């Protein structure tokens, strides 16, 4: 994705308070400093008013995009070199596999104790294409709906670098073929020589520290590892809220694999049958 910002535009955004920098602990930093911090500092663009239609109901949220400063620095350095060489036609080379993550602020949770939070790992097939091989798309829509309906509002942190629990889209496509041959979602990752779950929640933790500090919050998740990973980063006042959506015959075996891996899903949760597909009930 294209990651470069012209320096004059960057300065204008800083002056408008639309571009800021925080440390891994969520502490505001000097965004105008050209020094690359030794820690995984984040640069944040926003807020940007954005009407969305994920739930079918009109809803306007405040969108922020955030990325690690160290990754932006590499792009900025290349851009400066291209300008010096008159290589404007080469700016298309300013592409990167870096993840630009997102934050949606829903309602007015800024001063509330115990806001509702969802840290959602991106899933192109589920979130965008509406695939029913997993529950990701329904979970995303349900999280937005539930946070919007909550009197305290809350936050949705969308982690763009988490495709396939961290293995990327290309490898995820291969795991789907292995699943069609009988492996479950975790076995397929491991068959490729990859971790069953390699997601890094460091940046999500930094954003949440910036947003809620030491206040308690409720986390929409079934995954105890997600909670323990955030707790290891210093977020210790988390209450888990079960988050189940989109259970049907297409993804029941996938969800059973999650349950056997330790997710907070009860056997009776998988008896729901809200969208029975035509044809085979095979895990897809």
Image: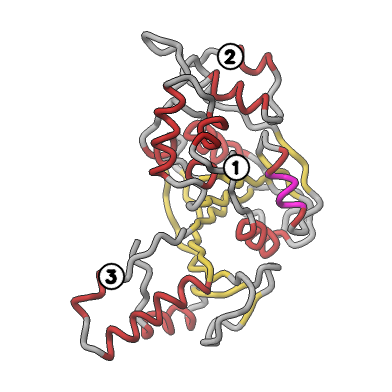
- The residue that mark 3 highlights is 93
Residue lying at 61% horizontally and 45% vertically, measured from the top left: 118
Q: In the rendering, at what x and y percent does residue 117 appear?
A: 65, 47
The image quadrant of residue 242 is: top right
* Quadrant assignment for the C terminus: top left
- The residue that mark 1 highlights is 197
Q: Is residue 48 left or right of residue 152?
A: left
Viewer can see residue 110: no
* Vertical order, 43 against 215 (above or below): below
Mark toward the start of the polypeptide (3 vs 1): 3
Q: Is residue 188 left or right of residue 266?
A: left
The CA span between labels 2 and 1 is 26 Å
Color theme of the render = secondary structure
Of 196 and 131, nearer the camera is: 196
| Region in magenta | 226-231
Mark toward the start of the polypeptide (2 vs 3): 3
The CA span between labels 3 and 1 is 31 Å
Q: Which mark is residue 272?
A: 2
Of tags 2 and 1, the one toward the viewer is 1
Q: Residues within 10 Å of mark 2 (few under 14, many from 20)?
A: some
């Amino acid at each position: 994705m294209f990651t470069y910002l012209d320096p004059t535009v960057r300065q204008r955004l800083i002056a408008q308070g639309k571009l800021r920098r925080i440390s891994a602990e969520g502490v505001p930093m000097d965004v105008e400093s050209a020094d690359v911090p030794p820690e995984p500092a984040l640069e944040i663009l926003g807020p940007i008013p954005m009407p969305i239609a994920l739930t079918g109901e009109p809803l306007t949220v405040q969108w922020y995009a955030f990325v690690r400063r160290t990754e932006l620095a590499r792009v900025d350095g290349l851009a400066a070199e291209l300008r010096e060489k008159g290589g404007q036609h080469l700016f298309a080379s300013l592409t990167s596999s870096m993840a630009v993550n997102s934050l949606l602020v829903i309602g007015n949770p800024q001063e509330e104790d115990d806001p509702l939070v969802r840290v959602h790992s991106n899933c192109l097939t589920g979130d965008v294409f509406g695939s029913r091989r997993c529950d990701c798309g329904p979970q995303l829509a349900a999280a937005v709906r539930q946070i919007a309906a909550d009197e305290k509002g809350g936050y949705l942190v969308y982690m763009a670098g988490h495709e396939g629990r961290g293995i990327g889209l290309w490898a995820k496509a291969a795991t789907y073929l292995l699943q069609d041959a009988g492996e479950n979602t975790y076995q397929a990752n491991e068959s490729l020589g990859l971790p069953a779950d390699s997601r890094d929640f460091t940046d999500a933790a930094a954003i949440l520290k910036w947003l809620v500090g030491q206040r308690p919050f409720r986390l929409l998740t079934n995954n105890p590892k997600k909670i323990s990973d955030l707790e290891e980063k210093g977020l210790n006042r988390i209450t888990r809220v079960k988050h189940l959506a989109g259970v049907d015959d297409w993804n029941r075996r996938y969800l059973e694999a999650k349950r056997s891996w330790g997710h907070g899903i009860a056997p009776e949760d998988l008896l729901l049958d809200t969208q029975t597909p035509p044809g085979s009930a095979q895990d897809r």
